[in-house]
Image (cartoon, helix red, strand yellow):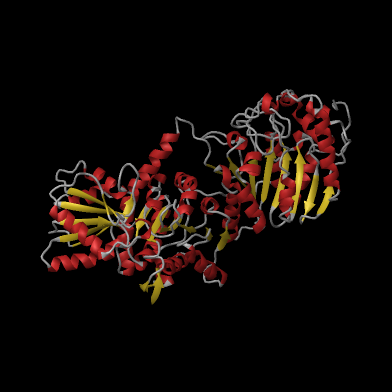
Amino acid sequence: MKKLLTGNSAISLGVMLCRAEVISAYPITPQTTIVEELSEIVADGRLKAKFIRVESEHSAMACVAAASAAGARVFTASSSHGLAYMHEMLHWTSGTRLPVVMVNANRSIGSPWNIWCDHSDSLSQRDTGWVQFYCQSAQEALDTVIQAFKIAEEVLLPVMVLEDGFFLSHTSEVVDVPEQKAVDAFLPPFKPRFKLSPEEPHTFNIMADPSMFINFKHEAQQAMNQAKKVIARVDREFKTHFGRGYGYTGNVRMTDADVVLLTMGTAASTALEVIDAFRKQGKKVGLCRLRMFRPFPSEEVGRLLGKVKKVAVLDRDNSLGAGGIVAQELKAALYGAVKKPRIFEFIAGLGGRDITPQDIGEIFNYAMSHSDSNGVPVWMGVAK
Amino acid sequence: MDGGREVKGIEVQAKELLDEYLHSGHGACPGCAMPVVLRTLFHALGEKTIAVITAGCFGTISGTYPVSPIKIPAYNTPFPSAGAAGSGIRAALDAKGDTETTVVAVAGDGGTFDIGIQAISAAAERNDDYIFLCYDNEAYMNTGIQRSSATPWGAWTTTTPPSELKAQPKKDIVQIMAAHHVPYVATTSVAYPDDFIRKIRKAKETRGFKFIYTFSPCPVGWRFPSEITIRLARLAVQTKVFPLYEVEDGERYALSVEPEGTPVSEYLKPQGRFNFLREGDMERIQENVDREWERLMRRF
């Protein structure tokens, strides 16, 4: 059924359709309306779930992780400082190999205080062992939540679904909400191989000494490698069931492009307008929207961008002392490629600053008019 | 010394704890009260139990992969989160229709009084249906005897050296938890196993949040010979240092054991951690214990 929904509302309905059994969360802008709506959905009986209103994000993740270990399908949502507060638990959850699904509404991290969108919150959790998907639309956010449970429960790794705070979480668009029956057919109930059960007692997360610890981490790495294949397969199955698929990346007019913009999240939608305008002027520009950040699709991105002359990376984040995180990852992925594009790096849209069509036009023009970058990111919109 | 004294009310002998869920291979130090705490706890709860373990002595006692000495399902969770993990497991069981299995979260004084109190207070406020058991050995023993907010006044620890002994009394965790008006709060001691078992069974039969506070003498951290653990636990009760009582719904108080009022010095002297007390400190501690006792009695 088609509905006019905000990103947060689409996600809430997605969680309902996935029949999550335990939900626990703590309010934080701009994620809050997800858990408000889920509270209503649980309260009015549309979803038979236990909703635990915890006192912190650390407890939210601890609570759903433990519930997952006890065999329940679980969900939480957070943002920014809340995600940072969960940091220890994010490692713990992937270490325990629990299929927790979380939505994070991307928001900057203070100080200074700022409640608006950038990607520094989730990108600073990139090493916690979670699969990460960055969404462009409310439809994609809903669909990715459904895919996320299927992926997580197969590979036993947690999945983080990212949506741009306010730009996606609080704006409305027409969303095709799948039927419950269709989701049930796609996503069977969660049947864990191991769970906390008096019938078959196990001790979870016992001490692993130096002779064993590395094995646990190696197995998790293998699961993350396997996740890449599972993610592709689940996306294909999803397309068969629902007619929509997303891939690791969203590629627009890349084959003949002189300059490709690589970015994540809703800035891609703005870029599409600019690309149309530039193409009308005969300027060959294209887009590679990175949807899957973990596992990082190194091979695929290398294959896609190896033929391109120039790639402009638009980072909505910055690692102090190192530059944009997406650019760093891309450069590492391309290091071994036979043919490499010139990489131009841009830092923009921090703390919710609009990334306008003019900004993206400037980025394209900069890349087109420079033969090489000096390796230093260009910061967009810094007041002089 | 009370070794020759007849102690009333002890009917359970260690060999009678037939339902054993803690086995050999655990990592407890010689003389540690925790194996007795855990055996008593699990015996009283039975096999339909899921335990939450957090950082602390129990985390170490619970073994090293691939061996576990615990025969019931158990889940380790990071230090601040035992309170939240207990709620999560309860919720998952309820969601699956399992109302029979008991969830018990076990944390030390650090994981309860200090880093864990936020999540525990929240679970108590929500009145989530599980048992939270705090074993108090009065310092961060697992990391090597650092002071916690459960360390008593005047005690030596590795972070309260002789020239700067703990200068604050311990936090009154039982009153804090009772102030949440949860259905059941009780204190227990390994020196009184029948009382311990009765209270755990009562907690198991009570719906809502239950807080069990148990005293866990630590030979390593308190500097006493490992064979007097149970005697010290009994002395703590008899000197009124650790009163055994229950609180229902935050208001109905009941005393479980009437202490003899043994002088506190008998409890303090065998412990090396109190070797650095200055003149008059014993009396000061005695006065404080008497004052706390009177304050507690006003609630009965």
- Image-based side of A253 in relation to B281, left or right: left
Quarter of the image containing the C terminus of chain A? bottom left
Q: How many marks?
A: 0
Q: Which residue occupies 33% across, 59% down?
A: A234
Q: Which residue occupies 68% across, 25% down?
A: B163
Quarter of the image containing the N terminus of chain A? bottom left
- Image-based side of B241 in relation to A276, left or right: right
Q: Nearer the viewer, residue B86 or A80?
A: A80
Q: Quadrant of residue A256?
A: bottom left
Is residue A21 visible in the rendered structure shown here?
A: yes
Q: Quadrant of residue B144?
A: top right
Q: Position of residue A29 (x, y in %)?
A: 47, 61
Q: Which residue occupies 70% across, 41% down?
A: B19
Q: Residue furthest front?
A: A384
Q: Position of residue A81 (x, y in %)?
A: 47, 53
- Image-based side of A347 in relation to A162, left or right: left
Q: Quadrant of residue B279?
A: top right
Q: Nearer the viewer, residue B56 or A183?
A: B56
Q: Position of residue B127 (x, y in %)?
A: 67, 57
* Vertical side of A223 occupied by A79: above or below: below
* Vertical side of A286 occupied by B292: above or below: above
Q: Position of residue A359 (x, y in %)?
A: 25, 61
- Image-based side of B71 in relation to B270, left or right: left
Is residue B101 visible in the rendered structure shown here?
A: no
